[in-house]
Amino acid sequence: MKIIVGAGSVGLSIAYKILLKYKRGNDIVVIDRYNLPTKGTSLKNSGVLHAGLYYPPKSEKSKLCIDGHEQLKKLCFDNNLPILKCGKIILPINNLDYERITDLYINASSCNRHVSIIDFNYAKKIQPNINQRNSYLWSPETSVFSPSSILEFLYKFLLNSGVKFIKDKVELINNEKEKIITSKNQTIKFTKLFNCAGPGSLNLYKKNNLNKSHLTILPILGQYAIMPSRNILKTNLYPAPDPTLPFLGVHLTPMINGNILIGPNAVPVFKKDVQGFEFEDFLTISSKLFNHAKLFLNNSQNYRKHALNELSFNVLEKFKNQVSQFIKLDKSLENEIFMDNTLSGIRPQLYDYKKNKLINDFVYEKEDNVIHIINAVSPAFTSCLSLADKIININI
């Protein structure tokens, strides 16, 4: 029996690829503690199908993103799932950004990504109301998909193929006896196990590996706003990325449903229970606060600049100001922008408190017949099918 813990994009992709490879749905069990498919991190995704511009050539992130992009795009086309081939324009906000755009062009070209440096006349043909700059980076391969449609397709395909789904929480993985124990006191034997429980993956792993106690999860809340389209956004609009910061910044995305997604704002959270992210006691909450403070005070990975950029007493006003940096916006449209809390989601950020460092790479650990996907970071959804291939090859 092959068990997958977690019904998000990575877990469902692994189950899907195992099914395609071995043709035995009744040999696969998917367990998720909340919903089937997930209503967690995978669903709270902007739906940008990344082209692989940001990652060093031949790096794992680059390979997984580029191959994952092609696989996910093909899945959408082959199964009539919604996809918007709209491209992406990256534009400079300040003078330093022109150099960053040039560096990004060189990197993306080295990864065989189809990108070009364009001028204002070309940019306004793509996005008529774009703000004037000397140059921009154009990525025609970037697209937009529907996260909910992908998850629902994978779930129904697996279900109709005999895969068993269980709504329960895995409390313990016993590697030696090859069994799991759930919160409902179920004991299930396995031959192979894939721990894809998102923010819960690390907790399950650490129960048998105390030597990894220096790793923890810092929850980051991604907030979004919506602007009714009025057919004004033709492409993704992104700021030039600051390589010293851990996130890409607020961007504009034309959604499948026709609206415009604005965000995310990425802020640390400390509540006891935020969208399935549970902290067991005050000590745990205090440790999260301490780790955020340590990053801020030591300015590790330029974290202080990020925190000061993200913190805002009026997030909606911040989003409106960000939109005005990308496109010309009349007052009537600006007044239609509203916060949408249903789109807010937790990004589980892996943190090494010994090194005082945020970990922004994929992290997985294999032991016996179990593999733990401890950190499935952006672009995890874009990469999910390619990552599934890699994980299956490691564990089967």
Image (spheres, rainbow, N blue to C red):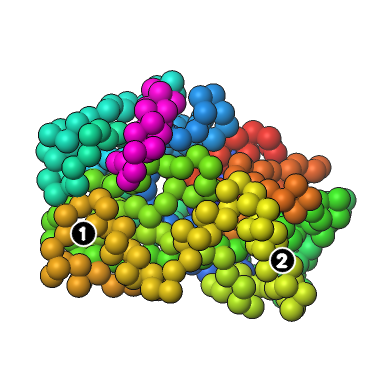
Labels 1 & 2 near each other (Cβ < 8 A): no
In this view, the residue in front, 304 or 158, is: 304
Instruction: Say whether residue 338 is left or right of residue 51.
Output: left
Q: Secondary structure at mark 2?
A: helix
Q: Which residue is mark 1?
A: 258
Residue 289 placement: quadrant: bottom right
Residue 59 percent coordinates (x, y): 56, 28
What is the three-letter code of the residue carrying label 2?
Answer: Phe
What type of secondary structure mainly makes up the magenta span?
Answer: helix
> Can residue 297 be seen here?
yes
Q: Which mark is residue 194?
A: none
Is residue 72 something one can see in this rendering? no
Q: Residue furthest front?
A: 95
Q: Looking at the picture, does residue 118 appear above or below residue 249? A: above
Q: Which residue position is annotated with label 2?
A: 290
Between the residue at mark 1 and the residue at mark 2, the CA separation in whole angstroms equals 41 Å
Who comes first in sequence, dot 1 or dot 2?
1
In this rendering, would 226 be left or right of 44?
left
| Residue appearing at x 43%, y 62% in the figure | 265
Residue 198: image location, x then y, percent: 61, 57
Amino acid type shown at disc 1 = Gly
Hey, which quadrant is residue 107 in on the image?
Answer: top left
In reply to whether residue 321 is colored magenta, the answer given is: no
Q: Residue at x 27, y 58 (%)?
A: 323
Question: Which residue is more in the foreground, 13 or 117?
Answer: 117
Residue span colored magenta: 91-109
**Neighbourhood count class around disc 2 (C-alpha, 10 Å): few under 14, some 14–19, many 20 upward:** few
Q: Where does the image place residue 391, in percent across and percent down from the top left?
A: 63, 39
